[in-house]
Image (spheres, rainbow, N blue to C red):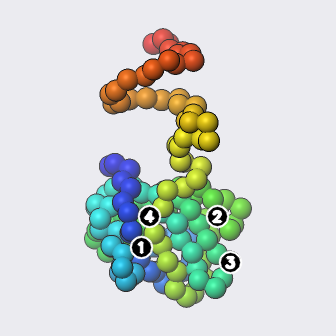
Amino acid sequence: MALVLKDRVQESTTTTGTGTLTLGGAVTGYQSFSAIGNGNTTYYAIYHTGVDEWEVGIGTYTASGTTLSRDTVLASSNSGSLVNFTSGTKNVWSDYPADKAVYLDASGSISEPIVNISGISGAITTPESITFDITP
């Protein structure tokens, strides 16, 4: 399915361990992960309030059972591995991880080199260089 980003998505969970999160409903003022759409992936962050347990990654939302799998960990309090969450309430939200962000820097340049472009329309003005991979 598609990678989906949505604003103001946050739910609570009491899931423990390293497995799939069972979502407990939207936090007041936010929408639920159902906005992501069944079977779609999204970036997520989870934080255990009052405990030094957190994780940022890519997960898949499943409407049946209202769960979010933890497919790929991008960063965590466990040295970049799955966190074995202890008991208690955690907040989990749709996030846009810094390592995945593309933005204009202070000089107006794109922050990272673009290594793959598909489905883009528009103009490129004054490129410094363009390299094409013509390997079959």
Determine which residue is flagged by label 2.
Answer: 76
In three-dimensional space, the C-alpha distance between marks 3 and 1, rounded to whole angstroms, equals 19 Å
Which callout, 3 or 4, points at the residue further toward the start of the chain? 3
Q: Disc 3 residue type?
A: Asp
- Residue 32 x/y as whole percent: 33, 73
**Residue nearer the viewer, 84 or 10:** 10
Which callout, 2 or 3, points at the residue further toward the start of the chain? 3
Tell me the tag on residue 94: 4
Badge 3 marks a residue whose secondary structure is: loop
Q: Residues within 10 Å of mark 3 (few under 14, many from 20)?
A: few
**Badge 4 vs badge 1, beta-carbon distance below 8 Å:** yes
Residue 23 lies left or right of residue 44; in this view the side is left
Badge 1 marks a residue whose secondary structure is: strand
In three-dimensional space, the C-alpha distance between marks 2 and 3, rounded to whole angstroms, equals 10 Å
Q: Disc 2 residue type?
A: Ser
Which callout, 4 or 2, points at the residue further toward the start of the chain? 2
Let me know if residue 28 appears in the view. Answer: yes
Task: Name which residue lies at 38% across and 23% down.
Answer: 123
**Badge 3 vs badge 1, beta-carbon distance below 8 Å:** no
Badge 2 marks a residue whose secondary structure is: strand
**Badge 4 vs badge 2, beta-carbon distance below 8 Å:** no
Task: Name which residue lies at 33% across and 73% down.
Answer: 31
Tell me the tag on residue 23: none
Q: Residues within 10 Å of mark 4 (few under 14, many from 20)?
A: many
Q: Disc 1 residue type?
A: Gln
Tell me the tag on residue 52: 3
Determine which residue is flagged by label 1.
Answer: 10
Task: Name which residue lies at 66% across and 82% down.
Answer: 51
Q: Residue furthest toward the right? A: 79
- Residue 121 x/y as whole percent: 32, 28
**Residue nearer the viewer, 63 or 34:** 34
